[in-house]
Amino acid sequence: MTPEHGGNLWKGVRALNDEEWLRLSLCAWGLGGSECRYRPLFTQCPPPGGGGDTFVPTDLSADVLSHLATKSGAQKVLRLSWKYLNGYGYVPARDDVRFNVAFATTDIPLDRGPPAQQEYPMIDEAKEMGFVAAAGGVGRSGLATLLKDVSFAGHKKWTDPVPSNKARLYWVDIPAACGKRYLFRILPKRFCFDNSGVRFSEAEYLLHKDIDCSR
């Protein structure tokens, strides 16, 4: 095929001469002109919840599960959960978004007032800056503990998810201590198919929970 006709094979079926081969080669290497009519190989890679992707996590909650604490030996178990539909492009089997969960702990303040913005893990900590793994995707990132690449409940590693048009449930269980305040930053991340890497959400999803065992 010649550059002028693109994929229209019914045109220009004669053998290409040396000049046409050169022009076709230049197009293939991205060095040609307007006759190449370049088109992107992949769709754009927006961050979750931005750039045309309107789907965001919902129903964020943090709940204390005492019955799990008895089994695990921890004082308390804190379950962080949310729902999310990966609906960008309306492809039911789309599975390119994971979640980073960064958390920090402080003592419960005497006034029990809401935490200040700066008490939550920083955005760079949730983005894995300086991440040091302790076990798999769990480790330290700056001053925060980081859980990397959280998938939806029931999704087994190296398996394809069943297509869905409904929001899936996500959750993580964290051993918790009495008298502590847990501060979470949940950060959606998209693994880009255009080989540009990872795009992190630009929105903030912050949550905190006090573990008061005296009540």
Image (cartoon, helix red, strand yellow):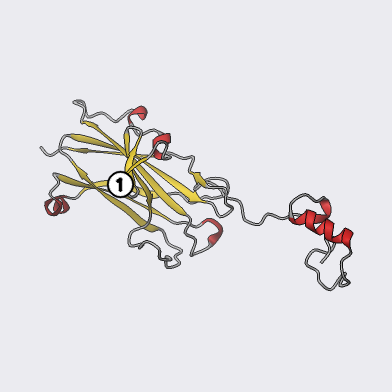
Does any portion of residue 147 appear in the rendered image? yes
Where 132 sits versus 98, above or below? Answer: above
In the image as oriented, which residue stretches furthest toward the front?
18
Q: Is residue 8 left or right of residue 100?
A: right
Q: Mark 1: which amino acid?
A: Ser
Count the labels in the image. 1
Does any portion of residue 37 appear in the rendered image? no
Estimate how packed mark 1 is, as few (under 14), some (14 to 19) or many (20 or more) residues with alpha carbons within 10 Å.
some
Where 68 sits versus 181, above or below? Answer: below
Q: Is residue 50 left or right of residue 73?
A: right
Q: Residue 188 in the image: x percent, y percent? A: 44, 47
Residue 25: which quarter of the image?
bottom right
Q: Residue 179 in the image: x percent, y percent? A: 16, 34
Residue 158: which quarter of the image?
bottom left
Quarter of the picture holding the N terminus:
bottom right
Label 1 sits on a secondary structure element that is strand
Q: Residue at x 86, y 72 (%)?
A: 13
State the residue position of label 1.
61
Q: Residue at x 46, y 47 (%)?
A: 189
Which residue is more in the foreground, 88 or 199? 199
Q: Residue 64 in the image: x percent, y percent? A: 20, 47
Q: Residue 86 in the image: x percent, y percent? A: 47, 56
Quarter of the picture holding the C terminus:
top left
Q: Residue at x 62, y 55 (%)?
A: 43
Q: Residue at x 49, y 61 (%)?
A: 94
